[in-house]
Amino acid sequence: MEVTCQGLPVFWINGWLAAVGATVLDDRIRLHWTTGDHLAILSAADYDPVEALVESWPKQELLEDLPIAEQWQGAGVLERKVKVDSFRQRARAARGHPRSWTLSSTMTDLSVDKNREVAHARFDPVGPGSIKSLHHRLLKVHKYVEKPSSERIRASLAGEEPRVQDNGLGFDPARLGSQADKSKVYTEPVVEVMAFFGLKLLPMRGRGVDSSFAAEAFGGGGRQRGWSQGAPRFCWPAWDQPLDVHGIDALLDLWNPKDKKNRWSALGVHAAWQSVKYKALSTSDPTRAYGSERL
């Protein structure tokens, strides 16, 4: 059975991440994209993918026990600024945990600054005041959809569910109102929770540089999968063939946005986008968001 998701267009970073996250939440689900308006299509063999999402929806207890929690099984404390020793202690404790990826997709000890703090992923942005850590934001937005019905999820996938006043994961451009004033922020909680799980396929990498010992500059040392070096942009594709989470993982390894389009076609990729960073209103503006433009 297939569900075309009007609410998850590929050009919306959070929509793309949410569609990928659906395959992470339930390995029965496959994902591909329409070629006209570039919408996500979720499918599952002899099963409704919406019902699969209802069955696999993460419970609050599961999210509270993620290895990126501030405190977890006595293995150090992870605040926003994470010392490399604390990260390594947590990583050792989480080894073999089914969701240890929440560490590797948000931080890396292969890039350490002069204060011996690890690098954060760009999809793990800092936030002002009560926004706190990515884990805190996830728990907060999840409370709106702790036990969503199939009707609730179906409406979200269709783009018909009202947004709630919440910052979500902290990088959705659609949450922002007018730049002319301090508008309230609104996000779609089902999409935000699914998008978090999409981060599983975007691990952090680094050059193995510890700037507390080396003279080399820290800037650019940590990089998340899909992000370019230099002027950092995230690039992501749309593909024709229904892929499960492992197929998407393999595709992201093989696809290169700099390749010629005939190489894309050989992989089933028919279009791609790159991120456009939110332009801060001032040097003190902490807002993070990513729009898009087609490649």
Image (tube, rainbow, N blue to C red):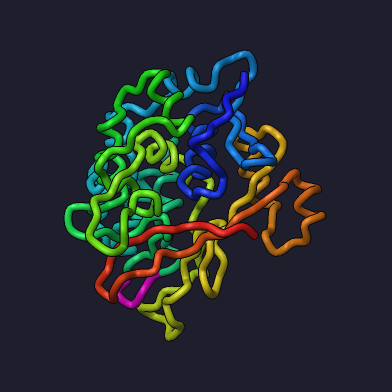
Left-right relation of 28 to 79:
right
Q: Is 95 rendered above or below residue 215? A: above
Residue in the image at 44% along x and 42% along y? 195
Magenta residues (range): 112-116
Which quadrant of the figure contains the N terminus? top right
Which quadrant of the figure contains the C terminus? bottom right
Q: Quadrant of residue 160?
A: top left
On whether residue 253 falls in the magenta region, the answer is no
Residue 94: x %, y % from top left: 38, 43
Left-right relation of 110 to 248:
left
Q: Is residue 85 visible?
A: no
Residue 232: x %, y % from top left: 51, 68
Q: Main secondary structure of the magenta part?
A: loop
Q: Is 45 rendered above or below residue 161? A: above
Residue in the image at 52% along x and 57% along y? 292
Residue 275: x %, y % from top left: 52, 60
On whether residue 114 falls in the magenta region, the answer is yes
Residue in the image at 50% along x and 59% along y? 224
Across the whole image, how many numbered discs are drawn on residues?
A: 0
**Is residue 197 or residue 172 the one in the foreground?**
172
Residue farthest toward the left in the current orientation of the protein? 129
Residue in the image at 39% along x and 58% along y? 289
**Is residue 142 or residue 221 the one in the foreground?**
142
**Is residue 243 or residue 216 the one in the foreground?**
243
Residue 287: x %, y % from top left: 31, 62
Left-right relation of 141 to 119:
left
Q: Quadrant of residue 235?
A: bottom right
Q: Is residue 177 visible?
A: yes
Residue farthest toward the top in the current orientation of the protein? 46
Q: Quadrant of residue 99?
A: top left
